Image (spheres, helix red, strand yellow):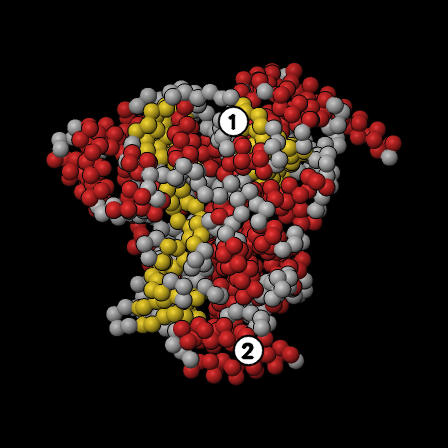
Amino acid sequence: SVVMERILQRRSLQLRDKQQDWQETPEGQKMLEFRRSLPAFKEKDALLKAVSENQVIVVSGETGCGKTTQLPQYILESEIEAARGAVCSIICTQPRRISAMAVSERVAAERGEKLGDSVGYKVRLEGMKGRDTRLLFCTTGILLRRLLVDRNLKGVTHVIVDEIHERGMNEDFLLIVLKELLLRRPELRLILMSATLNAELFSSYFGGAPMIHIPGFTYPVRSLFLENILEMTGYRLNSYNQIDDYGQEKAWKMQKQAQSLKKRKSQIASAVEDAVEAADFKEYSLRTQESLSCWNPDSIGFNLIEYVLCHIVKKERPGAVLVFMTGWDDINSLKDQLQSHPLLGDPSKVLLLACHGSMASSEQRLIFDKPEDGVRKIVLATNMAETSITINDVVFVVDCGKAKETSYDALNNTPCLLPSWISKAAARQRRGRAGRVQPGECYHLYPRCVYDAFADYQLPELLRTPLQSLCLQIKSLQLGSISEFLSRALQPPEPLSVQNAVEYLKIIGALDENENLTLLGRNLSTLPVEPKLGKMLIFGAIFNCLDPIMTVVAGLSARDPFLMPFDKKDLAESAKAQFAARNYSDHLALVRAYEGWKDAERKQSSYEYCWRNFLSAQTLKAIDSLRKQFFFLLKDTGLVDQNPENCNRWSHDEHLIRAIICAGLFPGICSVVNKEKSIALKTMEDGQVLLYSNSVNAGVPKIPYPWLVFNEKVKVNSVFLRDSTGVSDSVLLLFGGNISRGGLDGHLKMLGGYLEFFMKPALADTYISLRREVEELIQK
Ligand code: ADP
Ligand code: MG
């Protein structure tokens, strides 16, 4: 070991020399100068001192002050200085994969190294990490996964948890685990980093850990609300008539009132408020999130955004524009729309970029680069550009006021993913992005009074999402009783939510009655997908129809490859309907579309294929790589037949695929009653539900199946099923639920509840004999 120590020490010294050499080159000098100009640099010594003297510290500071890129580097550098460069191991978690990748690339560049030398990254599906990697940026999920096999984080010297103010579920979870780990590993250092100033909360969670604030500087940003924008740009809200997703009716009313008031500023402002009130905003004064949904039901008005962007490009001073959108699909559709615009689509005048979780890294770099003179950079981003990514030359921010967040209604156990209003803190954060280099402007696409009704802060994710995956993880990490563990969270979730999740895991057979992990549960916890999708994969493997099931699961855990461009929705829908010809299944349509794409790829016509069928090549590629990963993971479970041909022996059998989809998605089930002119759908929890218009089952005259199983339902005004597959009685009876739970009788009782509820008790008899037969077969 003395020899080993020598080797490590020598390697540490080499690292130090290498850094010094780089810093003496002209590029290195320039980089060093830039790094020294960041606000974090002034606090460098204080930060390092605090890290060495305390087990836990909390660091806060304005976005862009250098927390993420500098602080981990300071620690790395000081370890290298102290000749511990070869033995330290610093892990810095990021809530999103894209920031882990972007930041590691940046830090490597700042150190004049290749990614994978001393700085690396690891995210799901991808990574760049070498033997000498000492500073690893990874997603929080990756660190949690590592804890699964390495409970004590052996060898790790520093853990940095970034962006904790976002209060993501994984981060809150990680903090519970780390809090306990710190007791076992007294030499381990934990650094928490946050953008906004709720540092006290985290500090007190860790017994009063010291807080260090990095003072920052931003230029003032002028806030323009909808009423100001209307007045300034002269935009007429009645040109909304092409879109139906912005609550145009109310907008219309406002416009009429505004017109009659001859557009005088104060009067317009009050007209907006009046209109908001007139439109039955009784609860408005309650200032709850819920009452806000009256103003803007779903998405944001693309035409207004287009108009505002035109205004900026034509009339405003130079400077990049950052547009906050709700999600990837919105960004893509808007980008399509803008690209066909005579001014905004002209590449000699406008550089139009998208910034979201799954963009290519070449596109990523463009976001940070300055465009050529005379070209205006416009970046369409999700809320990740709020805090984790800083684009320096932004002068104008356009804020739609919404973000997609998962919320969860514990009472009827319904998860919903829908754009909802952001918090005041988030709106301020978005606005702040415009003041990095000079005074800026922020266009809020909603009235001031709506802003006033925003919540101060967003609810932590742990309190607004279903906890199934998390509970499974708690069990597989052997962290003891689920409810006891979660009660130690920063803000513990409601007991009812915990109870629902545990009950769900019992229904699908991942936990037994005593809350112990079953074999299925153990397998599910190793798969990087939601439990229900994991169950589908495992069934796909067992029943030898792996390929189509992997496609379905990849499609459901990535995103929908079917594009629905806003102005060609009809064409796109009929293209999708072709894939669903007579099979009444969005999931089977996806399988066909994917298989068609693979075929087209072989014939080198995939581009044309995607274009003709309104498919996203990028998403199909993502599905492709997810499938590959699933295959390897499933092989590890030993459930995949050794002979690769066998595992697809039944892949052509559509009935079986349907059955396995049902096995996975149960209890996501809805009954179908075909009426003369319409179809009535209902679920046990919600009563009447509707189909999302993109579903192949929407708008068909008749659905020849008594049931639909679905993956996702979304509550807007009514409850909508996003995707569905028709299944027969016998499939539901044989594949729905968990046969081992409470024996056959218990299972029957549960299904019986469903059958009775849907008034089909006669089916129970058929079921009993069928299922008995199956049970006997399985016994054999
Ligand atoms: P914080 O984490 O405090 O928000 P960061 O460490 O991410 O700040 O960023 C510090 C500075 O480094 C910012 O001014 C940002 O513009 C710059 N920066 C970060 N990433 C890149 C990049 N990939 N290319 C160029 N500049 C970058
Ligand atoms: Mg940061």
Classify the position of the N terminus by image quarter: top right
Q: Which label belongs to residue 266?
A: none
Percent x, y for residue 185?
72, 39
Q: Is residue 141 visible?
A: no
Residue visible at 69% across and 18% down? Answer: 20
Residue 190's x, y, as percent? 64, 34
Look at the numbered disc 1 and say if its residue's Cβ is closer than 8 Å to ligand 1: yes
**What residue is drawn where x is 56% and y is 77%?**
744
Q: What residue is shown at x 38% (from left), y 77% (from top)?
A: 759
> Picture coordinates of residue 650 (x, y %)?
55, 70
Q: x, y percentage for residue 780? A: 66, 80
Q: Is residue 446 left or right of residue 505?
A: left
Q: Residues within 10 Å of mark 2 (few under 14, many from 20)?
A: some
Residue drawn 20% across the image and 33% down it: 270
Residue ID for mark 2? 745
- Point out which mark residue 61 bears: 1
How far apart are labels 1 and 2 at the CA level?
59 Å
Q: Is residue 215 left or right of residue 152?
A: left
Residue toward you, 679 or 352: 679
Say which quarter of the image contains residue 710: bottom left
